[in-house]
Amino acid sequence: MATSRPYAVVLFGATGFTGALTAQYLARHLPAGTPWALAGRNRDKLKRVAAGLSGDADAPALVEADSADRRSLADLAAATRALATTVGPYMRHGEPLVRACVEQGTHYCDLTGEPEFVNTLIPRYHEAARKAGCAIVNCCGFDSIPHDAGTLFTVGELARAHGGRLNAPVQVEAAVSFSASFSGGTWQSALEAFARPRENQQRLRDAQVRLKQWYPRRVGTLSSRPHKDQELGGWLAPMPTIDPLVVLRSAQALEEYGPSFRYGHYLRTGGLPRLMAGAAGVGGLVLAAQIGPLRRRLLKSRPAGEGPDQATRARSWFQVRFRGRCGDTEVRCRVAGGDPGYDETAKMLSETLMGLGLDQAGPAHTGVVTPVMALGERLIERLMAAGMVFEREA
């Protein structure tokens, strides 16, 4: 990657709700003297975002770019070492920017939770990105850093308790609980994904064929049946998100996860009646998303670019409890933070972007990779320094 680029980091999509929060986080945490920029379609909106920033970072440059304008994306990617984007749904808007970053050898990170998008990128861009020396890092918000980095942390604690290298099969279970409101963008992305089950399955099969060629280590999932587990917090239900795919990709690529690895991914619920009601609600939403008029009505009910006020976000929280096992050794760990859908997501995306663009070591792995594959323990260190909790429980 060229070292003479005018910017160290660029944020694309800074005028959206989550984008503006990410811009504010960067303004408060980028080292003084770091050249950076905000990018988007509308310069006047960018000016308003920039005028509201406070912090020690230098004022950002403003760059006009449009996800439908290939030339503007190429120029944007060529101007920076690392770029983050909050512009979704990614299946609709994301691939042209990924292509531009791969062509220019620019590190990239995003907030997608869309499996179809990620599984589309893996076979199309992994080898080209690796040759270009850049990391294309998806899922850098609540989807899926708490689970991806939390599993790495748990595996590290398990290795220490086990006395060193994990030379027997490893399994990790994770149970998440939260009190929060999620963004219109997340809502829109989820509905888009639910509407395309066949496409999702085909993209998943294509990606897994390639991943097994590149990373032949054995990984798999644990039982996905609802069950009660007092150690992890009570009634647990399988959670149909992208997080397990991200965790298993990290485990497939990294030797520290043991000779084989299995993962269980759950949502902690308040009891069996609530679990059953939640499952029925998700099932109904999946069916509704596949009916055009209902999907369009649901999409309009929560537009992208909107979110809760600061007081509401301040009351929000999340916690993921982990249990790791290797042979007779067992550890329990916890990852926790504040508002997952906005404030903590802006933090996680920003810390990933700064790790890619500012850390002298650069990403540990290039290609289309997970947050843990790209930054490993450095990501955990950054997030802990920023106030997120990673701890081993007694």
Image (cartoon, grey):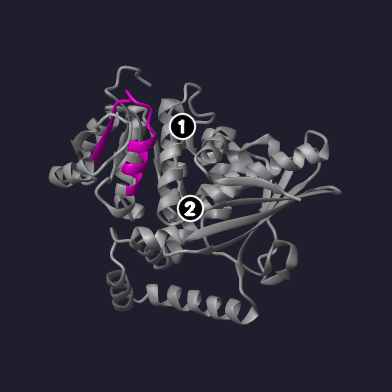
Q: Residue furthest left?
A: 44
Which residue occupies 38% across, 21% down? 1
Q: Mark on residue 355? A: 1
Crowding at label 1, few (<14), some or many (≥20) Cα neighbours within 10 Å?
many
**Rendered location of residue 36, percent (x, y):** 29, 30
Q: Residue furthest right?
A: 328
Tag 2's secondary structure? loop
Tag 1's secondary structure? helix
- Please state which amino acid type lies under the numbered disc 2: Phe
Side of 169 where 148 appears, left or right: left
Q: Mark on residue 174? A: none
Q: Is residue 166 shown to the viewer in this render?
A: no
Where is residue 253, by image quadrant? top right
Q: Earlier in the sequence, mark 2 or mark 1?
A: 2
Residue stretch rendered in magenta on the structure: 21-39
**Rendered location of residue 258, percent (x, y):** 74, 40
Instruction: Reply above or below: 279 against 379.
Output: below
> Does 31 lie within the magenta span?
yes
Crowding at label 2, few (<14), some or many (≥20) Cα neighbours within 10 Å?
many
Q: Is residue 273 shown to the viewer in this render?
A: yes
- Please state which amino acid type lies under the numbered disc 1: Gly
Side of 97 where 151 appears, left or right: right
